[in-house]
Image (cartoon, grey):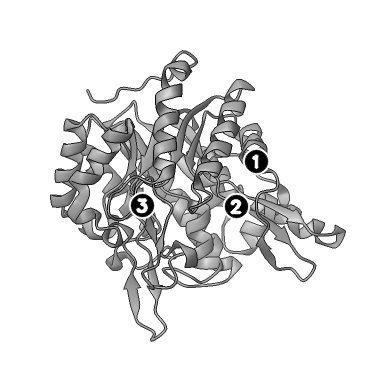
Amino acid sequence: MFATGIENSYPNIILPDGTVKRVDEMEKANHYERWREDFNLVKEMGIEFLRYGPPFYSVFEGPGRYNWDFTDETFNALKEMNIIPIVDLCHFGMPNWLGNFQNPDFPAYFAEYALAFARRYPYLQFYTPINEIFITAMFSAQYGWWNECLASDRAYVTALKNLCKANVLAMAAIMRVQPDAIFIQSESSEYFHAEDPSCSKLAHFLNQKRFLSLDLTYGYPISAEMFLYLQDNGMTREEYQWFRDNQVKAHCIMGNDYYYTNEHMVHPNGTTSASGEIFGYYVITHQYYRRYRLPVMHTETNMIEPNSVGWLRKEWANAKRLKRDGIPLVGFTWYSLIDQVDWDSALRNDAGNINALGLYDMDRNIRAVGKEYKKIIKQWRGVLQEESYGLHFNHYL
């Protein structure tokens, strides 16, 4: 599955003057006006699969109330163009009327939304119910950057359990409509390196914590240390057992996102900083695969120009080697189709900085990495089809 995506983040941030602003990446990239052109670029690339989702915050207007106008236009066009969406239902934000990820009512309402979406588009098969739960919870409730803008372990665990429960409930709701649904859980793959022996204990803790979003989603048995951490920060034994009893792992592909910033150095004073690429995608994805034993998809990567082409070649080499070494890797994604805005500050600064990360620039001119990805797709598609793994893809019924 060669894929790209339309960057559709929409968290709330607090501006320096104290006002709250919705950061809508599809708006910043002019996708609302140029979506037809963007879909044509997907076809031009020779890409069949598109990570794409409607703006959850504006579609879900209230309990039982939805505005499907833009979603109908775009998803009907994707169907006509035979572009297969991997439907991204929640990407870093939620409707204002629901508040933020501390809200215990969020899971049930999100399941309602997922069910309504699936009923409206019952032919769709591929979903990412909630994108990057680890990052959503960390940036919103541990670092204090987005949405609830809290910074504590208790806030993090609250966001985490609400996000994971919403994710699981949404999968169950979608399967009521589409029993052949496949869930590609795009999640950030992380690793924490100890700078010296004094950092080893904290690094070990963080390397367990990085798995929690997938542990809960997949009902994986966690360590005693992580169980105590969750309990100490507000998760009850009954809440934890719910995840053990309600996993839908059989319908899942594990999506691993990997960027240059996904590895971290743990320092003696307890802080962490970006370490750059030390292990790389191959080693870290092996760690996740050994834990969950699920088919894998490389669901996000990018690098800013002028290093983008070299990074694409490296990530593609890592993916090919994983596949040839027996890991059931089913897809690869350069994220995203169009340049992004303000990701140099993790969307915290509403500065309008264009980040040259896309296959195409803001004027919809192909970048060097777009040309390279197009070449890779053309060269490798036929070879990889002969090595496919027997997953049943309905495409459009």
Q: Circle 1 sits on which residue?
A: 284
Name the side, left or right, on which 87 lies relative to 167: left
Callout 2 secondary element = loop
Query: Label 3 sits on what residue type?
Result: Glu
Residue 14 lies in quadrant: bottom left
Callout 1 secondary element = helix
- In the rendered image of this protein, does residue 300 appear above or below residue 183? below
Q: Nearer the viewer, residue 353 or 53?
A: 353
Numbered circle sitting on residue 262: 2
Query: Label 2 sits on what residue type?
Result: Asn
Mark 2 Cα shell of 10 Å, populated few (<14), some (14-19), many (≥20): many
Q: Nearer the viewer, residue 80 or 136?
A: 80
Q: Do the residues bearing badges 2 and 1 touch, measured as CB atoms within 8 Å?
A: yes
Where, quadrant-wise, is the N terminus in this rendering? top left
- Residue sitting at 18 percent across and 44 percent down? 36
Q: Circle 3 sits on which residue?
A: 7
Q: Is residue 241 visible?
A: no
